[in-house]
Image (spheres, rainbow, N blue to C red):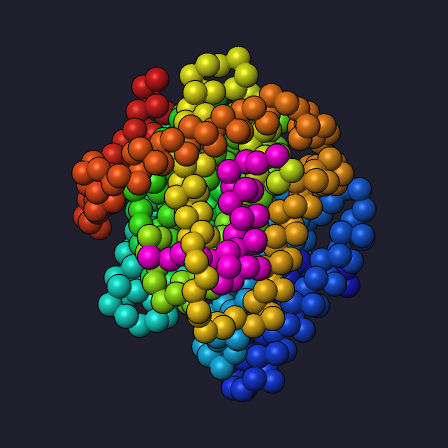
Amino acid sequence: MMHLIPVFFVFIPIIGALIVYLFKGRFPAYLLFLCQAVLIGLYVSYLLALGSNPNISLVVFGGWDELFAISFHNDRLSLTFVGLTIFMWTMLLLYTFKTNQDENKFLFFLMFLQGIFLGLIQTNDLFNLFVFLELMTVLITILIAYKKTGPSFRAGIYYLLLNTIGAMFFLIGIIMIYYVYGTINIQYLIENMHLYADEKLIRLAYVMMLSGISVKAAFFPLFTWLPMAHGVAQTSISALLSGLVVKGALYMYIRINLNMFSSAPYQMTEVFFYIGALTALTGVIFALTQKDLKQILAYHTVSQIGIMMMGLSSVAELSYVGGLLHILNHALFKSLLFLGAGLVIHAYQTKKVYEIRGVLKSMPLTAILLIVGMLSISGAPFFNGFVSKTLVKYDFKGDLFKMLIFTLINIGTITSFIKFSQILFGHRVDIEKRHDIKQMISMVIIGLGCLAIGLFYIPIGEFIFDKNLSYVNHLDPRQWIDYLTYVMIGMIFYRYVIAKDFKPLKWIREFKITFENANYMFILYMVMISFFMFFR
């Protein structure tokens, strides 16, 4: 029975989705919480069964050679993502339930997407990875466009077309690998990639697959779909896109580039480090110019993805762990910020940052949770963002240029959230109560998660990553001086530059990229990756 739990992870949410779709009404909708409770119970029992060596391969169809069978593979990485997925989906279901408990179609797509996402994390063959990826693309498109407005349809179609193009190139890479190796089993390819890794066809497959993943992960300059989708989607979907969906692409990056092609002589981790740096800087610059709360958060998703890539592509092991931990931390604090912003927008009936004031007095609990999210994303000591950012920059100590880039990103992030924090101050505003207890419970739990990782990172690091994270020290005076210095610089920069809204800031804010130009950038991106692959 225990070996079937990975299959249950996929099918329980899908069965729950079918029940809520076929049997309309509130009672079937409440059954979705039972599904989540069962998933949590199965996950805990699965971890206990695996013990200290969480590494198991499951062949779904018996009798087939594992080399060709559809199989799931779980290890520390995949199980961490499975746990994060179940937790975040439970919180988002709690948050959105009041608004969508009668929307059986919305709940159907939301739960179905959870099952598909859990399949993507666990699958052990490349073709099923592509299948899950495409199913996710279709479901996310529907959820983005669910409001059925003109902007939501445009954003949904933009997301669908651009991500489908990326997926097609990923599929072409899979075909090339199958042609050379005769299998698409990921574990086999990890062990045997060195046999033909230097062949031109496999090099080209590497370019195709990494280019496709780059679209899904919103790397620079392929991130244009993300702020469009965030701007029109429901708050819970924005939190889902930012907190988990793009992380699925980063998970693929780890599996393909860092695991499957680990023995290849052209892994290009240094190239992807600078792609991550460009992604982070671009996201911060665009975020600084925005006046829409959700757009500020959307562009900071782009920026934080860049920080994750900088960690994942570093040579130092602690920096790599920092990149992984930042994936988990970002899922928490960015979801918290989106959910809190959603309540504020609903209450004030505007998304404009300069039109919202007095949140601290009008919505005190929401304001406190937003402060937790802002301190976390800015890397304040005692919060989870501080831990992962400190680990990410571990590899930059001897490299002045890399440290300078990282410092600029931190200052830009803090400046942006100084701007965001202006909504907290001012006189109390009489607003109609727009949230219920379930929404606040979900946000409080996520906020406590931000604090828990910030305070108990050493046992968490040993349990999840099997690493000693004692390098991080919240009481180190140098860390406090650095953070307070960044805050001071950020306050000055906000007051004398950002708040003035000079013309260059307006130009950046109004800069739009058409679908046609997005395709040209994708081609240029592939050319750049190919150049570093074949001619460096």
Q: Which quadrant, please, contains the N terminus?
A: bottom right
Q: Is residue 412 above or below residue 355?
A: above
- Residue at 57% x, 59% y is 365
Q: Nearer the viewer, residue 294 or 240?
A: 294
Q: Is residue 172 above or below residue 35?
A: above
Left or right for 426, reference 46: left
Dominant secondary structure of the magenta stretch?
helix
Q: Is residue 195 above or below residue 160?
A: above
User: Is residue 510 something that shows in the picture?
Assistant: yes
Q: Indicate yes or no whether the magenta region holds residue 323.
A: no
- Residue at 21% x, 42% y is 506
| Residue placed furthest toward the front | 427
Q: Nearer the viewer, residue 493 or 219?
A: 493
User: Is residue 236 something that shows in the picture?
Assistant: no
Quadrant for residue 491, please give it: top left
Q: Nearer the viewer, residue 225 or 344?
A: 344
Image x and y of residue 360, in percent: 50, 56
Q: Is residue 297 above or below residue 89?
A: above
Image x and y of residue 213, in percent: 41, 43
Quadrant for residue 427, please give it: bottom left
Image x and y of residue 111, in percent: 53, 68
Q: Which residues are magenta?
A: 355-381
Image x and y of residue 102, in percent: 49, 82
Q: Nearer the viewer, residue 292 or 52?
A: 292
Q: Indicate yes or no whether the magenta region holds residue 375.
A: yes
- Residue at 46% x, 79% y is 103
Quadrant for residue 475, please give it: top right
- Residue at 18% x, 38% y is 503
Q: Which quadrant, please, contains the C terminus?
A: top left
